[in-house]
Amino acid sequence: MRVNAYAAPDAGQPLAPMVIERRDVGPNDVLIEIRYAGICHSDIHTVNGDWGPQPFPVVPGHEIVGIVTEVGSEVTRHRVGDRVGVGCMVNSCGECTNCRNGDEQYCLNGSVPTYAGTDRDGTTTQGGYSTHVVVDADFVLSVPESLDLAAAAPLLCAGITTYSPLRRWGAGPGRKVAIVGLGGLGHMGVKIAHALGAEVTVLSQSLKKQEDGLRLGADHYYATSDPSTFEQLAGQFDLIVNTVSAPIDVDAYLSLLAVDGALVNVGAPPEPLSLDVFSLIGGRRSFAGSQIGGIALTQEMLDFCAEHHIASDIELISADQVNTAYERVLASDVRYRFVIDTATLT
Ligand code: NAP
Ligand code: ZN
């Protein structure tokens, strides 16, 4: 099946329209007519070559929502007409310890990324900036009816990437949680941490988005460009989730943790981060990382968001606005996720 898409022809090149091939629907596959695709900063890192060479041309997009239009003969979980979503991975071995534990993203045989990956049939995967996609049914999520479809798209990456560490490190009543960076991931982190009952602080470069941060559910908002912020908040937080796409001063953020606190990095800058071990030793603190979340947890997150009436704050754009949107994300000028209306791809 040949479908319209928007692709990066080479590293650092502007995205442009392209026709790509989708595989035939296999026995355990679902064909999805994509309605909306979110723009994640990871799409930009990938096509700009920040994370190394890629199999260009690359069709980015791993925040996909749409409607099922065909299912394979063995599919039982999804039916034609269902509202569904696809996140950052489309396959894994299903047999290793991590897959069996519901951590498919850490598959020991390599989980298959939604784009720029090699699927288990040997083909290169292409992502959601397109009109249709064929995905193994086990990697297709159900999008609850009460969620607006366009605003739900970013939950498939930004939502699960923040929900997972917030749950694992126990964000909840009586816990002080800070979110660093109020972009796509950060604004979902604020909404979810607030819904979990935590006391939420935003640590942003400036106070420009303070009003938004408080509206999204934050209790406090500080500018990290003001050195007094780090003095005032020393030793305060049980959990800090860092969503920044660029390197940060790890030691400065570790100093904000209470004893036994954790700084969890989800931001994925191309440069290595360094830290002074005394920042950890001096408070029994942890520095950790977290990658998206497993399929069962992603469904749990979607159901949680529906129950708490949470979705993303989005700016809906047409496909020909993608390159401008990339520039605005790079300039931290995103409020708070760009979502492509794939109807504009026809
Ligand atoms: P985004 O929308 O661009 O948000 C990042 C935010 O970080 C910006 O809005 C800005 O917030 C802050 N920031 C940007 N540059 C900065 C700098 N030089 N210094 C300090 N703060 C800066 O990006 P996103 O889509 O949320 O993604 C964030 C990062 O997470 C990316 O590196 C992405 O690849 C990664 N990611 C990881 C996973 C995972 O599984 N671990 C999943 C998805 C994405 P303020 O203006 O508020 O300061
Ligand atoms: Zn992403």
Image (spheres, grey):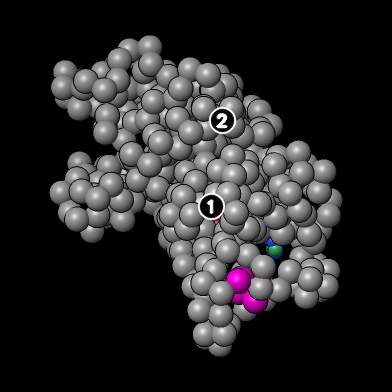
* Residue at 53% in and 19% down: 146
Q: Amino acid at mark 2?
A: His
If the image is split into quadrants, where does the N terminus sit? top left
- What residue does disc 1 label? 171
* Residue at 66% in and 32% down: 314
Q: Nearer the viewer, residue 99 or 26?
A: 99
| Sooner in the amino-acid sequence: mark 2 or mark 1 | 1
* Residue at 75% in and 72% down: 230
Name, please, the residue furthest toward the top: 81
Query: How far across and down, in percent of the image, does residue 258 sit?
Result: 60, 71
Q: Is residue 216 magenta?
A: no
Magenta region, residue range: 254-258
Query: How far across and down, in percent of the image, does residue 204 sit?
Result: 74, 58
Q: Amino acid at mark 1?
A: Ala
Q: Nearer the viewer, residue 306 or 186?
A: 306
Query: How far across and down, in percent of the image, does residue 245 sit?
Result: 60, 59
Horizontal arrangement in the rendering, residue 8 relative to residue 180 (left or right): left
Query: Quadrant location of residue 335?
Result: top right
- What residue does disc 2 label? 308
Q: Secondary structure at mark 1?
A: loop
Horizontal arrangement in the rendering, residue 253 relative to residue 22 (left or right): right
Q: Secondary structure at mark 2?
A: loop
Query: How far across and down, in percent of the image, does residue 220 sit?
Result: 76, 53
Horizontal arrangement in the rendering, residue 269 relative to residue 302 (left or right): right
Above or below for 193 versus 314:
below
